[in-house]
Image (cartoon, rainbow, N blue to C red):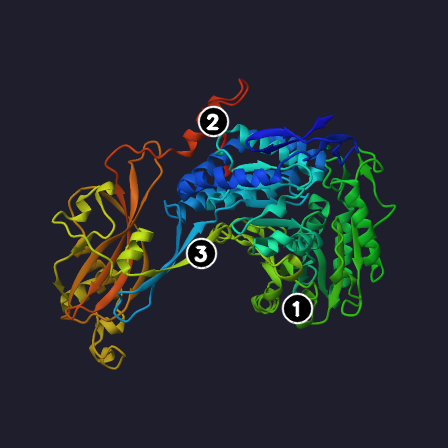
Amino acid sequence: MIRLKNYALGEWIEGKGKGTSLYNAVSGEEVAVASSDGLDFKAMLEYGRKSGGPTLRAMTFHQRARILKALAQYLTVRKEEAYAVSAWTGATRGDSWIDIDGGIGTLFAYASRGRREFPDETYYVDGGPEALSKGGTFIGRHICVPMEGVAVQINAFNFPVWGMLEKLATSFLAGVPSIVKPATVTSFLTENVAKMMVESGLLPAATFQLICGSAGDLLEHLGMQDSVAFTGSASTGLMLKGGKAVLENSVRFNQEADSLNFSMLGPDAAPGTEEFDLFVKEVAREMTVKAGQKCTAIRRTFVHESMVHDVTAALKKRLAGVKVGNPLIDGVRMGPLAGKGQVREVEKSVEKLRSGTELVFGGPGTLDVIGADAEKGAFYPTMLLYNGQPFTSTQAHDVEAFGPVNTIMPYASVDEAIELAKLGKGSLVGSLFTAKDDIARTVALGTAAYHGRLMLVNRHSAKESTGHGSPMPHLVHGGPGRAGGGEEMGGVRGVLHYMQRTAIQGSPQTVAAVTREWSKGASEVRDRIHPFRKFFEELVIGETHITHRRTVTESDVVSFAGISGDFFYAHMDDIAARESLFEKRVAHGYFVLSAAAGLFVDPAPGPVLANYGLEGLRFVKPVYIGDTIQARLTCKQKTAKEDREGQIPQGVVHWDVEVTNQHAEPVAVYTILTLVKRSAASTIPSSASQVEEALKSEAPDALRPAEVMEKTQPGDAPARVS
């Protein structure tokens, strides 16, 4: 019998004692034993804090992001092994894709965001300067730095891979080491993928540890710099959140709990409309994907009272076509629950639900299992219930059966449907199928306070919709009330959960020295050499160029109107301009922008390769014919770009630009970005090179580097996760 191993203190350690037996959800056969007995949980925390933390904090966001990308590529090559093990959990190929490819896709997503939305620094500057004094000599800014503890990540049984990787992606990018505790019942799959991660050699020592089995007294040793990210039942989360160390040390506790999510069919989406068909398809899919074992699955279905019969008939027909059985058999669309324990839990919940509902489809005696023994496996039939009095019989708003169970409820008006949605007391996600945008607005604003995510679907978005039950790395995953009150992912937001936001106050120069980002009032550096003649490495933060001046003429305004096609009256009609807020003709704002570029650009070929973009443009004062403008260009921030084969080594320079008039008054302010050549060959490793180096040390049957790059192009990342 396989005994799972824990990865602690840099070693794979087999737990002592009898342990917990783990079973194949399809056959009921014992496949592994999990135990964490003998682990020193306090030492594991100290190992992460003292060894893993300093290593990660010394890296920049870009360095951490490159490791995440390399890790995602590495796992992509080896994912078929994980698919084989995933079948033991009862997952179909499609279920496993959501879990495994979804988790890998989240690594890819955060690797990309880490390089695009974070600086090549060890910290993050949140927002712009805040003026705190009249004279501008005292300002404030916010910086975010990694917490100096360990991120303890406790995951649910239904997503053994995605649960681990979506939390690890954000904590690792933030610069915080992780201890991963998967649910024991499916920990054999988590261990399988964790072994690949460790074997890759990409994760620095002490930045990743794994517990298969009980967490023991781990949470009793948490300190004020540690954090907990928990996914699971609300009752378990409440127990953990109330722990002595968590409370005394104000440990950050982020909870994402199972919830009673809803899907609503708009009153306009009558039978025969595309929205009606899309709704039925989505509800049936959410009941059967992962056998309904998703924290985002649809538990409550709201239908206008005039369409209850049609929706019920359509769902019954669709569910009747779902083949249940061994997920390895072609045509099987729903496997078993994750284990016998889950079957018993669902049965208890259904018993409570049945006291206020009637069964309209499925249930006991209807299970027809293909290629497996229904008694030995953890199979459970799809069940569709109906509650005709949803405001007085509230079981469906209070009890969740964590399986293929759903309750249809009628509503008489949109306002009534909104109130039904709120009765779930806080959910991860709600969805609405309607062709009417005014209904979508009413429902969204009426239910948003009770839900972490809302999916508004019509025929125009359906083809590319990622689905009701699919959290995305770009968007927050979590919800209020029953859903735990936490929030995961959400792009940059998910990373900042593992960082401390601190306000910095001081002179502009002192604050700039801390942030390495120039702001107005900080010291400026002047040089006789034009900054566009300098390579990336030669530019210094605060380097400033003051241009010569240019007087705006009527010919400039007329010529720009002819070139751009912009004949707006304020530029061209003297009488109308006099009657406007400008009181006389003004130059085009984009002419001012173009003229400023002409003032500060050095035209000869040099290190500047291209204009990369423009941010934060504001026209703060009008420029009149006869005004004289001048520009100030200051190096605000620099970010080196990762080397790519065939590409000139380069970096992105952020320039603060202020255009003033003859009275030294700002007329336009903005930031321009330029691609600037680096003078020497880069030492920045590419993700591809990291994968190649890791693979060179693998066993003879491992894929070689060329095969890795062929199989791990960006398009391999999945479009949806759950």
Q: What amino acid is labelled 3 in the image? A: Arg
Q: Quadrant of residue 568?
A: bottom left
Give the secondary structure at mark 1.
Answer: helix
CA distance separating discs 3 and 1: 36 Å
Give the secondary structure at mark 3.
Answer: strand
Mark 3 or mark 1, whichever is nearer to me: 3
Image location of residue 364, percent across then percent down: 86, 48
Image location of residue 709, percent across then percent down: 46, 29
N-term-proximal mark, 2 vs 3: 3
x 22%, y 58%: residue: 594
Residue under pointer 1: 418
CA distance separating discs 2 and 1: 53 Å
Give the secondary structure at mark 2.
Answer: helix
Other residues around mark 2 within 10 Å, as few (<14) / some (14–19) / many (≥20): some
Q: Are marks 2 and 1 in contact (CB under 8 Å)?
A: no
Residue under pointer 2: 694
Image location of residue 677, percent across then percent down: 25, 40
Q: Are marks 3 and 1 in contact (CB under 8 Å)?
A: no
Q: Quadrant of residue 327?
A: top right
Residue 91 visible, this orientation: no
Mark 2 or mark 1, whichever is nearer to me: 2
Camera-nearest residue between 493 and 218: 218
N-term-proximal mark, 2 vs 1: 1
Q: Quadrant of residue 157?
A: top right
Other residues around mark 1 within 10 Å, as few (<14) / some (14–19) / many (≥20): many
Image location of residue 68, percent across then percent down: 48, 38
x 83%, y 43%: residue: 367
Residue under pointer 3: 501
Vertically, is 555 above or below 293? below
Residue 568 visible, this orientation: yes
Q: Which labelled disc corresponds to residue 283? A: none
